[in-house]
Image (cartoon, grey):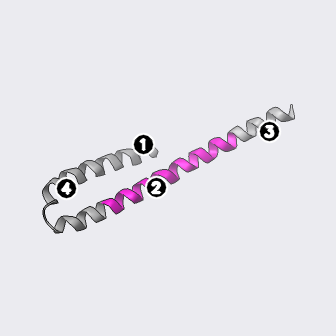
Amino acid sequence: MVEHLDRLFLSTVVAIDGRLCDLRRSERGQAFVEYALLLIVVAVAVAALADWGAFKGAIGTALTKVENALKQ
């Protein structure tokens, strides 16, 4: 899932970069940039939450291994 989000994030950044060249001189481009930045922040937050779930599972597994080693 994280790989999918990374690809989505990269394609969004590439699309934004292409549009910024066209819109940087007009005020209309300001709204586009604001929405694009908001989308990037949301994408980063979703990716962080997805990674947190995997990280949380890894911590739980490591603690279980330590607990089992201490019981022996």
The residue that mark 3 highlights is 67
In front of the other: label 1 or label 4?
Answer: 4
Q: Would you name the residue on which mark 2 appears?
A: 46
Which residue range is magenta in the image? 37-61
Q: Residues within 10 Å of mark 4 (few under 14, many from 20)?
A: some
Measure how far apart labels 3 and 4 are at the Cα level. Answer: 54 Å
Please check the rendered image and state whether residue 54 is part of the magenta-colored stretch, yes or no: yes
* Mark 2 vs mark 1, CA separation in Å: 12 Å
Identify residue type, mark 4. Answer: Leu
- Look at label 1 and name its amino acid: Glu
User: Please, is residue 68 above or below residue 53 in the view?
Assistant: above
Residue annotated with mark 4? 20
Element marked by disc 4: helix
What is the x, y in percent for residue 20?
Answer: 19, 55
Between 44 and 8, the one nearer to me in the picture:
44
User: Which sits earlier in the primary sequence, circle 2 or circle 1?
Assistant: 1
- Element under disc 1: helix
Q: CA distance from mark 3 to mark 1?
A: 32 Å
Whole-percent x and y of residue 46? 46, 55
Q: Which residue is found at the position 69% from the left and 44% from the top? A: 60
Tag 1: Cα neighbours inside 10 Å, few (<14), some, or many (≥20)? few
If you read the primary sequence from the N terminus, does the residue marked by circle 2 or circle 4 appear first? Answer: 4
- Which SS does the magenta portion mostly show? helix
Q: Is residue 33 magenta?
A: no
Gap in angstroms between the C-alphas marked 2 and 4: 24 Å
Q: State the CA–CA distance, disc 1 to disc 4.
A: 26 Å
Q: Is residue 62 left or right of residue 27?
A: right
In screen coordinates, is 48 left or right of 8? right
